[in-house]
């Protein structure tokens, strides 16, 4: 495993808050999550100990985003996590504009209350897409998520299938340990 991992903060939007952001990922990365205690774990699918114990799960997607809570000069980058409904809204916005990917899509992300799902709307002013926005490298997004969920690093996108199998094993092990700790 490489000693340096990609660390990117997860964008947190509090209830009643909103932020204008620019999506920087061409694609989103999605998976099913289980919540145990105060932490989420990626569901490995077949043979998942959390599924076997009927622990609830939810579909979640991530994209890289550029945002600012202050002035436009104070831009930051982070992981944007959202639900399936919010993803469908993003996809609709992208398709309405005739775009092949999400890079440069400008949206207002808001949350009506804490723990409510994110809602995406088009900004009141300015373009729907920023043509000058540069895409995040897909491997960077995957490695940031692997770091967040304590999974092995993805060294090369050509090894994606083998990496996914290693992540399934690691997720299964981590979920088993978390379930045992809760008993």
Image (spheres, grey):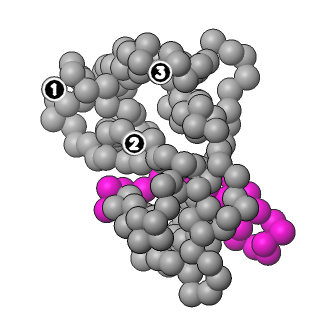
The residue pinned by badge 2 equals 30
- Local packing at callout 2 (Cα closer than 10 Å; few below 14, some 14-19, many 20+) is some
Kindly indicate whether the residue at mark 1 contacts the one at mark 3 (C-beta within 8 angstroms): no
Magenta-tinted stretch: 65-85
Can the viewer see residue 93? Answer: no
| Along the line of sight, the residue nearer the viewer: 97 or 33 | 97
Of discs 2 and 1, which sits in the foreground? 2
Q: Position of residue 69 (x, y in %)?
A: 70, 70
Q: Quadrant of the C terminus?
A: top left
The residue pinned by badge 3 equals 160
Can the viewer see residue 171? Answer: yes
What is the CA distance from the residue labelled 3 to the residue labelled 2? 14 Å
What is the CA distance from the residue labelled 2 to the residue labelled 1? 21 Å
Of discs 3 and 2, which sits in the foreground? 3
Point 34% across, 61% down: residue: 88
The numbered disc on residue 52 is 1
Point 69% across, 59% down: residue: 133
Residue placed farthest to the right in the image? Answer: 73
């Amino acid at each position: 495993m490489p000693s340096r991992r990609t660390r990117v903060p997860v964008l947190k939007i509090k209830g009643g808050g909103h932020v204008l952001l620019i999506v920087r990922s061409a694609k989103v990365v999605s998976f099913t999550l289980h919540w145990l205690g105060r932490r989420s774990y990626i569901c490995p699918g077949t043979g998942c100990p959390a599924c076997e114990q009927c622990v609830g799960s939810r579909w979640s997607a991530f994209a890289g985003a550029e945002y600012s809570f202050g002035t436009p000069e104070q831009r930051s980058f982070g992981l944007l996590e959202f639900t399936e409904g919010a993803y469908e809204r993003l996809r609709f916005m992208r398709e309405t504009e005739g775009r092949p990917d999400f890079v440069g899509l400008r949206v207002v992300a808001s949350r009506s209350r804490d723990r409510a799902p994110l809602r995406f709307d088009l900004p009141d002013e300015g373009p729907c897409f920023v043509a000058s926005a540069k895409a995040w490298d897909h491997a960077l997004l995957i490695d940031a998520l692997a770091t967040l969920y304590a999974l092995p690093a993805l060294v090369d996108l050509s090894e994606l299938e083998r990496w996914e199998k290693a992540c399934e094993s690691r997720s299964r092990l981590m979920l088993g340990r978390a379930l045992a700790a809760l008993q």
